[in-house]
Image: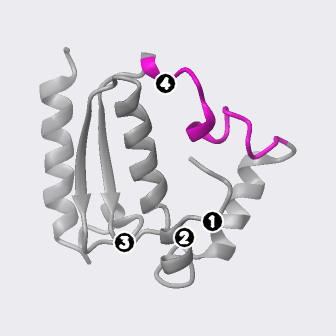
Amino acid sequence: TDFSYSTGSRLTYGQVHLLDSSLMEWFSRLYLGELDPSDPRASILTHRGLASSPSTLLVTAGLDPLFDEGVAYGCKLQNTGVGVDHLHCADLLHGFLSMPLALPKAIMVTQQISDYVRINISK
């Protein structure tokens, strides 16, 4: 959502856990190629047309280097009038949903996401 790399959560959690700064920079280079990192097509936080976005379920992990960007995205959506439901998992790390055997809470969160989609799919 933001390629400035200067958020508090990137600084706090960007050197620990599974997703570290060097890996994020590598992913960014692959994703961006020659595209300017501030281009709204790459950095959604700079996009001006978010008001037409659908209601959103924002899932954040408290130990994620991308946590602050997720919260900023949710705030930006809300400020444009988009409905945002925020499911925050304070004690989990980036990618936790792909680790249900190691992190049983991932199963519960996956069920919450499924419930949200089922309830909101026809709205």
Q: Nearer the viewer, mark 2 or mark 3?
A: 2
**Decide: marks 2, 1 in contact (CB < 8 A)?**
yes
In front: mark 4 or mark 3? Answer: 4
Q: Is residue 45 magenta?
A: yes
Q: Residue at x 77, y 57 (%)?
A: 29
Q: Residue under circle 3?
A: 93
User: Is 61 placed above or below 78 here?
Assistant: below
Of the numbered discs 2 and 3, the one sitting upstream in the chain is 2
Residue most extreme to the right: 34
Region rendered in magenta: 35-51
> Which residue matches tag 1?
6
The residue wearing badge 2 is 10
Residue occupied by mark 4: 50
- The answer to whether residue 31 is left or right of residue 87 is right
**Side of 19 relative to 64 (left or right):** right
Give the overall secondary structure of the magenta segment: loop
Q: Which kind of residue does numbered mark 3 sit on? A: Leu
